[in-house]
Image (cartoon, rainbow, N blue to C red):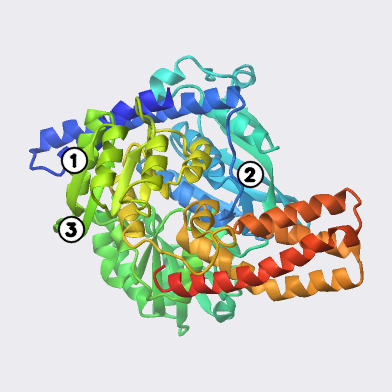
Amino acid sequence: MSHELRTPLNGVIGFAKQLLKTPLHSSQQDYIRTIERSATNLLSIINDILDFSKLEAGKMVLENIPFSLRETIEETVTMLSSTAREKELELVIDVDASIPEEVTGDAMRFSQIITNLVGNAIKFTDKGSVQLKLHLEDISEETVHIRCEIIDTGIGIDEQQQVSLFQAFGQGDSSISRRFGGTGLGLVITKRLVNRMDGQIGCHSTPNQGSTFWFSLPLNISQYSINSVLPLAPLKGKSVLLFESSELSRHVIERMLQRWGLKITLVKNAKQLEFIATQSNHIFDFAIFGCRTLTAFNEPANILKQAKSKIDYLLLISDCAEQEEVFSQLRPYVDKQLPLPVGEKLLSSSLLDPHSGRFNEHFIAIEPIATPAKLENLSVLAVDDNPANLKLIDTLLKELVTQVQVTDNGEKAIQLAKERSYDLIFMDIQMPGTDGITATKEIRSNSANRNTPIIAVTAHAIAEERERISTSGMDGYLPKPIDEAALKGVITRWKTKPKFTHFDQRTLNWDLCLTQANNKPDLALDMLKMLLKSLPETVEHIEHALNTTDKDKMLACIHKLHGACCYCGVPTTQMLCQEIESSLKRDVMIDDVEPEILELLDELTKVESAANQVISQLSVDI
């Protein structure tokens, strides 16, 4: 059903976007945008129903991949911020500083939980604020327990209606689906996802006063650093002027600045600001002003002009609904513009390197004039049994590459692959007769395209398909509905496929590295670098434990190495670790697994050599 429902929508959404590129008068553009929005909403509803059915059937597969907690939250909430801005709601992210940044889990599903709960809070709040607060509940060496609260000042829910909140196809009030839309599945999916992650979820609410939805989750702490930590020491002792009337935002920003060691001067009103601008001799390194705060006063541009004489660098938090109109008056006096909600990463990087690009582009309403892109000199084969989808991918590819050939079945694709060589093949998975998996295996065994990158094009949920795709000989995947930017990214990624011939693919498999890093090349490379860096110490500990027959130390060392292998595409090392670890856990003596340990030490030497080759070849490209 996933494939059958999403495939026709792929055509509707894709061609609506294509049509918007053509000359249309304003009412036609409006009609096409309505078609695209409606189709996207329908896709969202279908995804909800499919998620619900997978959870019901126990078929939901959860990832366990390292991700940045704050970055994921900030990216997710930022996607919802435009809706909050249109309703003039204050949207705030407040993350406990003691929560570690690098964790492992299913980032996509974690983001889905946040999206559902924050999206609901915005939907059911007409005035006031929506806060996302993250607290630390408990932390150990390997696990962190977090509690997330989404607090709104919305319509609230009475006790009787709260009972049906987490039931399928149920909403607190039967009139809600008429007024706000939705399937009534968002909360039940959220609850079941939280439960699948061994967490809990709940709600307490008062009608007409607001609601607090909360969930608590255990997450594994990643032993790998995913993001380079910003050096915040240079901010210590710097002075900052903070003028923000929204209490929630001010408190969150103030706490961040205090934690980084800045000297903060709070301004409560325009008179204080005017006094600092005209009477004080103090020069501030930074100033952070709220746009709404300034526009509440007469002649905000004059106030800003006076203040700027005492400020080296001025950041404006732009939370006004009419961004460009307001900002045009203030623009001459602003050095950088930040969107709400202000996250730690964005604010800290703006203060550390204030000249690293301005953020005005978030709010400029003028459409940029599209310049025709230069076509990539590539020959591409696209295979899809659905005529609309085939026509769409053909149209999109012809805007990106010089030669495109299409076919609507697997048999014909195999024949074409025998007749000529392609730079890239896009293969639909589900086709009648010879499906995409079978066609790929045949092309890999007997054709002129044995080493050509083959990309799976699938309307199925990716997590469930990924293993089948990777074992079939395919190199990557492109989800339907096809997104033009994603298609371009795939072409850029695979137009020069790296070929490693100096070592056994079972020692190190770069494609497996990519799969285990959620197809993020920079993350896969970082994981490999961290494994390489840890190898000398790991080898030393294994040899010492072997010489002293220290079983506990050997088990701890192999367990840690086994965990690292899960993210680095080293199948033989992973297999040996699993074998040694399970033997030691069954109380087998070290002497009895000595041959496997010595084999592992030999294999780690091969891994070190292979990793150095891959890193030196790929670092510059990535």
Mark 3 touching mark 1, by CB under 8 A? no
Nearer to us: label 2 or label 3: 3
Quarter of the image that includes the C terminus: bottom left
Q: Secondary structure at mark 1?
A: helix
Three-letter code for the amino acid on which mark 2 is drawn: Cys
The quarter of the picture where residue 276 lies is bottom left
Residue 620: quarter of image: bottom left
> Residue 378, how many percent across, how many down?
22, 57
Q: From this viewpoint, is residue 582 visible? A: yes
Residue 96 visible in the displayed image: no
Q: Which residue is mark 2?
A: 148
Tell which circle, 1 or 2, labels the residue nearer the N-terminal end. 1
Q: Looking at the image, which residue is at 21% across and 59% down?
A: 376
Mark 3 is surrounded, within 10 Å at the Cα level, by few (under 14), some (14 to 19) or many (20 or more) other residues, namely few
Residue 366, by quadrant, is: bottom left
Q: Nearer the viewer, residue 381 or 356?
A: 381
Query: What numbered label is drawn on residue 375?
Result: 3
**Disc 3 versus disc 1: nearer the observer:** 3
Residue 297: x and y, percent? Answer: 35, 58
Inspect the image, locate mark 1, and give the three-letter code of the amino acid beneath it: Gln
Quadrant (top left/top right/bottom left/bottom right) for the N terminus: top left
Residue density around tag 1, few if under 14, some if 14–19, many if 20 or more, within 10 Å: some
The residue to which callout 1 is attached is 18
Who is closer to the viewer here, 163 or 616?
A: 616
Query: Which of 198 and 241 lies nearest the eye of the viewer?
Result: 198
Looking at the picture, how far across and down is residue 349, in whole percent? Answer: 47, 70
In the rendered view, does 58 fall on the left or right side of 275?
right
What is the CA distance from the residue labelled 2 to the residue labelled 3? 47 Å
Name the residue at the bottom extreme: 281
Instruction: Give the mark count.
Output: 3
Asked whether, in this view, residue 369 is left or right of residue 54, the answer is left
